[in-house]
Amino acid sequence: MSLRKYLDRFFNNPDPQFHSKVLISLGIGGFIGWKVSPSFMFNHTVISEVNTLRKNRYYTLFTSAFSEKDGLQVFFNSLGLWFFASQATYMLGAQGLYTLYFTGSLAQFLGVYYKSKYSSYNERSLPALTTQKAAVASVFTFYILNNPWSTVYLFIFPVPAILVGLLMIVMGNHENDNNAYLFGASGSLMIFLLTRFRR
């Protein structure tokens, strides 16, 4: 089978949850990778001054989107993808979902890079970061932007989706987290505006 036919079959899979399962599986695989070989994962799935810029491992801009060593965070990321990635696939198509996912990841890298290099008097090294949380935040934010008043459950309480989005950004907007939710949401906003302008 040619690569083109394989990709066509992949992106046109009829299972509405197929691409959600792919992203969830890759995230869980990344978590297992941290347990099996943390040195390999650090070298190949973490964005940093040394890994990405000095050693020219630019592929970490993408592999970091599946890298997370906190098991509880992986669980919540998987849960978010299960409920909201299929909605993004319905609205954008499979390729659009992956574009949205990686846009959130790249938005975090660009945001942290700018803060490290240009937003202070003393230039700092790019800190080590993984971007799975920002990528998932991008998918969730896209749903919120399209359905701000739909009901989602915060633990067991039904609340408007827009409220969950605001809480997610405010609570997750801190330096220790490299502003993952904020930058992920900004990447999602860009995709959202592009879809509006194309109509």
Image (spheres, grey):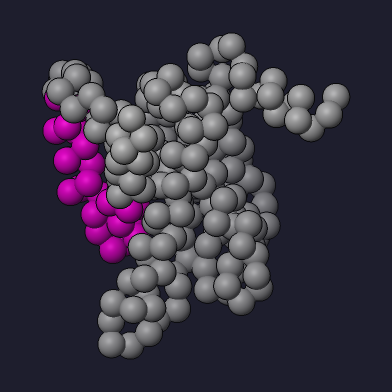
Q: Which SS does the magenta portion mostly show?
A: helix
Name the one closer to the observer, 7 or 136: 7
Residue 45 x/y as whole percent: 59, 55
Does the rendering let one see residue 85?
no
Q: Please identify the quadrant where the C terminus is shown.
A: top left
Residue 183 x/y as whole percent: 32, 53
- The residue located at (37%, 29%) in the rendering is 80
Decide whether residue 173 is among the magenta residues: yes
Does the rendering let one see residue 11?
yes
State the image quarter where residue 7 is shown.
top right
Name the one closer to the observer, 43 or 122: 122
Judged left or right of residue 18, residue 92 is left
Decide whether residue 135 is among the magenta residues: no
Query: Which residues make up the magenta segment?
Result: 160-183
Residue 109 x/y as whole percent: 44, 60
* 185 to 146, vertically: above or below: below
* 71 to 8, vertically: above or below: below
* 18 to 48, vertically: above or below: above
Residue 101 x/y as whole percent: 46, 40
